[in-house]
Every structure is written in structure tokens, then in C-alpha cells.
Image (cartoon, rainbow, N blue to C red):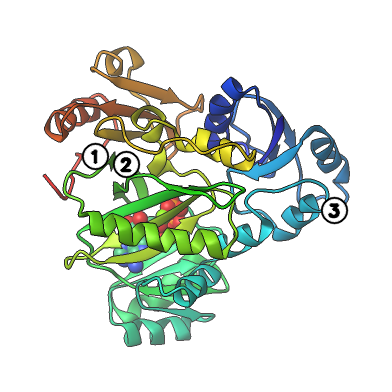
Amino acid sequence: MNIGVLGAGQLGRMLALAGYPLANRFTFLDTTGHPSAGIGEVIILNLDEEPDRRHLEAFLEKVDLVTYEFEHLPVSLVQAIEEVKPVYPSSEAIRVCQNRAEEKALFDRLGIPTPAYRLVESAEALEAAARELGCPVVAKSVTEGYDGKGQAVIRDPSEAADAWRSIKHPRLIVEAFVDFVREVSIIAVRGRDGQVAFYPMAENQHLDGILRYSIAPMPDLDDSVQQTADGYIRALLDELDYVGVLTLELFQTRDGGLLANEMAPRVHNSGHWSIDGAVTSQFENHLRAIQGLPLGDTSARMPTCMVNVIGREGEAAEILTLPDAHLHRYDKSERPGRKLAHVNLLAPTHDALLERVRACAALLPDAPAPCFSFE
Ligand SMILES: Nc1ncnc2c1ncn2[C@@H]1O[C@H](COP(=O)(O)OP(=O)(O)OP(=O)(O)O)[C@@H](O)[C@H]1O
Ligand SMILES: [Mg+2]
């Protein structure tokens, strides 16, 4: 089975690493001009050159089915591919998940709670929305955001004009700023036959909009909260007739409630812990799902923490002296804010795990101090 992947970054690299034992082959279609997968065959498609059909056709000839690791693609491109080869998840899923307005409308329709929000198309409307919702608010471009890019926090309505200018996007979503206890995510996988499996939720620590640490399972998570999250993501999966891995990022509030932040139609950074910490990783389960194979067990083997390596790498020889530490490097060059690698740490108890996480952070030049809600 030759699997075509739209996008060619580290998520695609890790999909391929999980797929080789299943005798899968991989062909990546890159539309950014900067592929980094470093594995499989990469075909570069220039979206600005109208008749670049030759590269698309070369890609389609090679692959049996198509999936993606990057959702900021023209929906028309995915629809054109879908006419020739099976695409999982569908172009409809990507259409909704790449647009924050569509995403929120779907959350509303399915009764999944989200922070209060408004859609605006001018600096004046942004200021009015900030007044109505009450500051602080977060303004985000409706499309193309990642790692906190295309966002601004507005602490007073008078800052709206500056925020509008800095984001440079014709359409923004403005959200009430949530005073959360912690950020969490739920990852689930749905097979071609509609079977669904849920991973234990992760607690995620961000700095400047970039994920730094994910820990799963959480030591203090109520079963009822996991069940609520399972219910939300199941509703999304079923509504979209989704095949593959879907991620839902949530805020947990003081009363234990959950508010949906955003979703990603793909494997996710907050699920990297599952490579070493779960019986079946999110990458393997995604590949099983899209090929119509039985889904694997999603349970955790042990408390696990994923530590992102961002901007600068530490010494591999030092990191690998930590017990039960697994270094996953993406073979990318160093650049501020760039995701270069992650370390998965496992330990029999959460206390022992936190000790290993602190020891690991001390070996990474730009790592912030780990700080979890349950400490
Ligand atoms: N309404 C909000 N209230 C409080 N904090 C928020 C809110 N929206 C976003 N944030 C913070 O900013 C981070 C990034 O926001 P969000 O997940 O919407 O953007 P993103 O750039 O698409 O991120 P990703 O890298 O996950 O794709 C969140 O993880 C959270 O820490
Ligand atoms: Mg996010």
C-alpha cells in the first residue's frame, strides 16, 4: 500500500516511521516548498503556478490512498484528489477544520461548549466585539493560524486597531479569554467501519502559544470529565463521517467543565507521548484506520510526558542517559520557535515522572520550567 500524504513535515515523518512495519510506502505532496519529512518520496507542488498538474498527476499515479498531516491546503485541491483516489479524512473534514468560523459553528450545532465569540471583518467591529465580550479577548485569523501565529490578546478595546493591523487578515474570530485551570486535549481515532477508540486525555502546557509539555494520563482526572470529552469528540467524528485520528483541544475551567478551543484533522503534537507511552501510537492507529484495519489498543502503558525540543537542541548523549527516555529528532535545522524534536519520558508514578521531566528540561537550552496543574 502506497500512502500519499498531503504535507511533508515531522508529522508525516512519524506517520511513515509507524507505517514501515506494516509494509506501507509513503509519497508526500509538499505545497510549502520546505519539506522536512526526510523520508519516503517527496513531490513538491507549486500552488502559485496554475498548470502544475504534472506534479499532482505524478503523485496520484503513485498512491493508493491519500491522507494528510497539514490542513492549510486549498479545499479545491483536496476535492480534485478525492475524485481520483480515496482521501481519509474527507475534504469536508478539512474544509471545516481549517476554518475557525466553520469549526465553531459545528461545535455550536453539536452542543459542544466553547468560549463566547464574535466574527469580525474590520478594526471597528473588532473594537465593538472586545467591548461586548469584555476584555481580555483573543483575536485570531479565521484561517491559517498555528503555534499561536495570527493571534493577538486585547486587554483593552483601545488596543483593537493595533491588533487588527498586526494580524493582517480580512476576517477574525474574537474570543473571550478563558481563565482556565489547565489546557487538555482528547485524541480519538475512527475506523472505516465507524468503530471509535479514545486515548486518555493529556494535560498540555504552552508558552507563547507553542506546546511545550504534554502529560498523559493525568493523575487527577475524573472519569466523568474523560467521558464528557469522549462524547464531544465522538459527536464530531460521527457528524463528519470521519476516518482517521482527530484531535480536540479544550480548556478545563475551575468547576471542572470543558470548553472546546479548536480541533485538528490529523495526528497532533499532544499525542506524541503515545509513540512510547501507549499500546498503539496515534500514528499507527491513524494508518490502521485509513487502511480499514482493526484499531489498536489506545491505553497508556505508564505515566508519560512529552517534552518538546524547540529552537535549539540539547545534547542527545545527555538526554539519553535519563531512564526510560526516548528521543525523537526531526532532522531539522535550529531556528527560534521551530519544533526540532521531542523526548518521551516514562515512569511508574507521576512523582517519578515529574523528576525525570525536570531533569530533561535542565538539558534543553530553551525549555521553560515544567509546571502542571496537579503538582
Ligand atoms: N480563548 C482563549 N482563552 C485563553 N487562552 C487562549 C484562548 N485561545 C487561545 N489561547 C491560548 O493560545 C494557545 C494557542 O491558541 P490556538 O490553539 O487557538 O491556536 P493555534 O495557533 O492554532 O495553535 P496550534 O499550534 O495548537 O494549532 C492556546 O493553546 C492557549 O494557550
Ligand atoms: Mg491550538
Q: Secondary structure at mark 2?
A: strand
Q: Residues within 10 Å of mark 1 (few under 14, many from 20)?
A: some
View quadrant of ligand 1: bottom left
Look at label 2 and name its amino acid: Arg
Task: Report the residue marked by disc 1.
Answer: 368
Q: Quadrant of the C terminus?
A: top left
Q: Nearer the viewer, residue 14 or 303?
A: 303
Position of residue 82 in the picture relative to residue 126 (left or right): right
Position of residue 87 in the picture relative to residue 154 (left or right): right
Q: CA distance from mark 2 to mark 3?
A: 39 Å
Q: Position of residue 35 (x, y in %)?
A: 63, 34
Front disc: 2 or 3: 2
Q: Earlier in the sequence, mark 2 or mark 3?
A: 3
Determine contact: label 1, label 2, CB under 8 Å.
Answer: yes
Task: Report the residue marked by disc 2.
Answer: 212
Q: CA distance from mark 1 to mark 2?
A: 8 Å
Q: Residues within 10 Å of mark 3 (few under 14, many from 20)?
A: few
Is residue 143 visible in the rendered structure shown here? no
The residue depicted at 60 percent of the width and 36 percent of the height is: 293
Task: Report the residue marked by disc 3.
Answer: 50
Q: Secondary structure at mark 3?
A: loop
Q: Earlier in the sequence, mark 3 or mark 1?
A: 3
Q: Earlier in the sequence, mark 1 or mark 2?
A: 2
Is residue 353 visible in the rendered structure shown here? yes
Look at label 3 and name its amino acid: Glu
Q: Quadrant of the N terminus?
A: top right
Front disc: 1 or 2: 2
Within 8 Å: ligand 1 and the Cβ of disc 2?
Answer: no
